[in-house]
Image: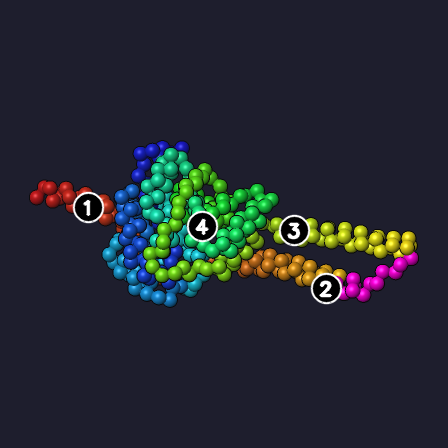
Amino acid sequence: MMNRTAQSPSISCVIPAFNEARNLGTVVPHILATLASLSQRVELIVVDDGSRDDTAAVMQGLCAAHVEVVYLKLSRNFGKEPALTAGIDATRGEVVILMDADGQHPVALLPQMLEKWRQGSDVVYAVRSSRHDQSSLQVSLTGLFYKLVNFGNRVKIPPNAGDFRLMDRKVVEALKRLPERNRFMKGLYAWVGFNSTAIDYQPLPRADGRSNFGLRGSISLALTGMLAFSIAPLRALTALGLVLSALALGYGAWVVGEYFLTGIAVPGYATIVVGMMFFSGIQLLAVGILAEYVGRIYEEVKQRPAYLISLRQGSGLPAALAQAQAEPAQDREASLL
């Protein structure tokens, strides 16, 4: 195994952005300054997920001012998971860091993450220490989701762990080999495995504006994660079918026994109507759950790309490395004059 103790790796940082023009102008230079203090070979890749604000203009200015910055503009809004995938596919660094564009991920943790990597961790992921900035409903739904998705699953997804993480190159290459279109990155991080270390953090206040990822987006992402990484809903339907069958047999035995023992005919109109409505609802629910799985199979077999890039600006690591190599040469030349 390569000795990482004294190694200064090349670093790629991926930032997906959607309508974050007011934040990128301050967040990108701040992150870039921290990365530059950790390594001379860095690149910062901003993936524009179909923004409708001035993100393109802001990023063009940042690319002109910083040779390390790469701007990837997707052809439309594909969602955060495909945007992360596009950024990961474009990285060239030995270490890859994922962060958000709203400034809520503290850059002060980056040196600690890199130190954990030097100590042998292949993945260093940040875990939220609290969710006091979210509503009680969202906190409850989040906790319920992690319990359901991890129930009976061999691959456990760490609760309260987001996309803020550092990954070794071999982890990135493993992620790039996963072909699915309905991507749930938190599950994919857990599925590839490798030696992982968690560190606690508390998200900072947003630099500006409001989050574009609300309760509706969280529910949609949770549904994708549940169907992509768990067959618990199908098992629940099987268990429900067994329980209802047992209840139906028991109720039938009770009706027959009461009729022969007491001679009392049980009125059946209300029972039949309620039973039909109940079982019809169960059947429709089962069909709906199966349709969600089948729909995702349909999306996968079409084999459409997870994202399309309409514009790439900036060279990233090769240009940054050339600049880092040129600066000492310029210094030597100046010392000879």
Q: CA distance from mark 3 to mark 2?
A: 20 Å
Comparing labels 3 and 2, the label whose residue is closer to the camera: 2
Which one is nearer the viewer's eye here, 152 or 94?
Answer: 152
Identify the amino acid type marked 1.
Answer: Glu
Relative to 313, say whether 189 is above or below.
above
First along the sequence among labels 1 and 2: 2
x, y percent for residue 282: 69, 59
Q: Counting other residues with Cα less than 10 Å from the Cα at mark 2, is it few (<14), some (14-19), or many (20 or more)?
A: few
Relative to 193, say whether 288 is above or below.
below
x, y percent for residue 133: 42, 53
Q: Considering the numbered disc 1 on the image, is that residue within a helix, a strand or a loop? A: helix
Q: Counting other residues with Cα less than 10 Å from the Cα at mark 4, is it few (<14), some (14-19), or many (20 or more)?
A: few
Q: CA distance from mark 3 to mark 1?
A: 63 Å
The reply to whether dot 3 and dot 1 touch (C-beta < 8 Å) is no
| Res. 266 image quadrant | bottom right
Q: Considering the numbered disc 3 on the image, is that residue within a helix, a strand or a loop? A: helix
Which one is nearer the viewer's eye here, 25 or 297?
Answer: 25
Identify the amino acid type marked 3.
Answer: Ala
The reply to whether dot 1 and dot 2 touch (C-beta < 8 Å) is no
Q: CA distance from mark 1 to mark 4?
A: 45 Å
First along the sequence among labels 3 and 2: 3
Which one is nearer the viewer's eye here, 204 or 137?
Answer: 137
The answer to whether 320 appears left or right of 153 in the picture is: left
Q: Which residues are magenta?
A: 263-274
Residue 236 got which mark?
3
Residue 327 got which mark?
1
Q: Residue at x 73, y 50 (%)?
A: 242
Q: Residue at x 29, y 42 (%)?
A: 38
